């Protein structure tokens, strides 16, 4: 999406042992509404999130967040500034119960942002929307796959994000769990949080995204409204054709 603010990648390139993962990527993602990032396996989607969250330093290019250059910001500083992400493989908080994981994130968020920073009532609403109350005292490690993903997304939503990056949140979810995920995303979006979502589940993605960017082999090949991108011939040929539609 054009305009100032949000996250901006300008000429970002990343190489791993000489192999280009991102080539001169320009992206602009608003800290409001829902923006999708799609592309074939290995096209660089997770690498974009790794660059924005500070796990990977780009070889070149400028990264801005709300107008400030953040290339040198530490990962914790980015999180405190509202750039919060989830991971493709849910793994965190495995040793805690669901109750303990929620309490931990609430405490940490209050320490970083001040008491009352957790949005009032959001925790209870998320627990209700995701049905995680049914496994409140279970160790997170013992949750079913879809529940683990819903837990990871809910905890990220509680960490006071201004832009929430979700890496394939729908992977492996049942249709019923997808509905719960969609409801949770709508809830935080309606609070004014921007959602940036990497997803292979096209029906789910195009059902919630306002804008979509498409990566192919580390290059942005299309950007626009969800409808524009869905109709783009190039996108259809490299990605949306065949089984993905
Ligand atoms: N830490 C790393 N070390 C070496 N190569 C990497 C590393 N991270 C990513 N790559 C490579 O960079 C390219 C982009 O990977 P990336 O994980 O960003 O793709 P992706 O679009 O998220 O794919 P998927 O849809 O399968 O999750 C791939 O060729 C991958 O093998
Ligand atoms: Mg990935």
Image (spheres, rainbow, N blue to C red):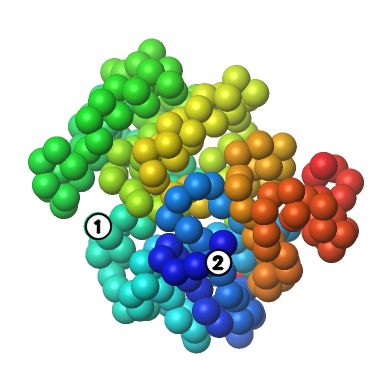
In terms of sequence position, does the residue under pointer 2 or pointer 1 come before the other?
A: 2
Which secondary structure, mark 1?
helix
Q: Residue visible at 87% across and 50% down?
A: 241
Residue 2, numbered label: 2
Is the residue at mark 2 in contact range of ligand 1, meaning its CB lies under 8 Å from it? no
For marks 2 and 1, give the CA distance: 25 Å
Q: Position of residue 87 (x, y in %)?
A: 47, 49
Q: In front: mark 2 or mark 1? A: 2
Q: Residue visible at 63% across and 80% down?
A: 23
For label 1, the residue is 80
Residue 67 horizontal side relative to residue 211, left or right: left
- Which residue is most to the top? 134
Q: Position of residue 84 (x, y in %)?
A: 37, 53
Residue 241 horizontal side relative to residue 230, left or right: right
Q: Position of residue 166 (x, y in %)?
A: 49, 48
- Which residue is most to the front? 3
Badge 1: few (under 14), some or many (20 or more) residues near its Cα, within 10 Å? Answer: some
Q: Position of residue 126 (x, y in %)?
A: 37, 26
- Eyeballing the image, is 63 above or below 239? below
Viewport quadrant of the C terminus = top right
The quadrant in which residue 21 appears is bottom right
Residue 222 horizontal side relative to residue 124, left or right: right
Tags 2 and 1 touching, CB below 8 Å: no
Residue 148 horizontal side relative to residue 92, left or right: right
- Looking at the image, can residue 210 be seen? yes
Q: Residue visible at 65% across and 23% down?
A: 175
């Amino acid at each position: 999406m054009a305009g100032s603010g949000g996250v901006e990648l300008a000429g970002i390139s990343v190489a791993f042992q000489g192999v280009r993962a991102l080539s001169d990527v320009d992206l602009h993602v608003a800290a409001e509404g829902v923006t999708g990032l799609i592309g074939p396996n290995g096209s660089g989607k997770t690498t974009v999130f790794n660059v924005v969250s500070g796990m990977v330093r780009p070889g070149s290019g400028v990264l801005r967040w709300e107008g400030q250059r953040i290339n040198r910001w530490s990962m914790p500083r980015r999180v405190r500034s509202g750039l919060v992400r989830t991971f493709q493989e849910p793994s965190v908080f495995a040793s805690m119960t669901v109750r303990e994981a929620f309490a931990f994130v609430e405490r940490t968020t209050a320490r970083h942002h001040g008491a009352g920073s957790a949005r009032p009532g959001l925790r209870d609403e998320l627990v209700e929307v995701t049905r995680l109350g049914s496994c409140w005292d279970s160790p997170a490690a013992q949750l079913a796959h879809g529940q683990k993903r819903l837990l990871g997304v809910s905890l990220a939503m509680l960490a006071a994000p201004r832009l929430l990056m979700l890496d394939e949140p729908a992977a492996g979810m049942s249709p019923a769990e997808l509905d719960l995920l969609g409801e949770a995303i709508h809830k935080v979006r309606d609070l004014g949080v921007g959602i940036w979502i990497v997803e292979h589940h096209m029906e789910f993605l195009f059902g919630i995204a306002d804008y979509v960017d498409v990566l192919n082999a580390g290059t942005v090949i299309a950007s626009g409204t969800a409808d524009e991108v869905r109709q783009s011939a190039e996108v259809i040929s490299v990605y949306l054709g065949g089984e993905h539609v």
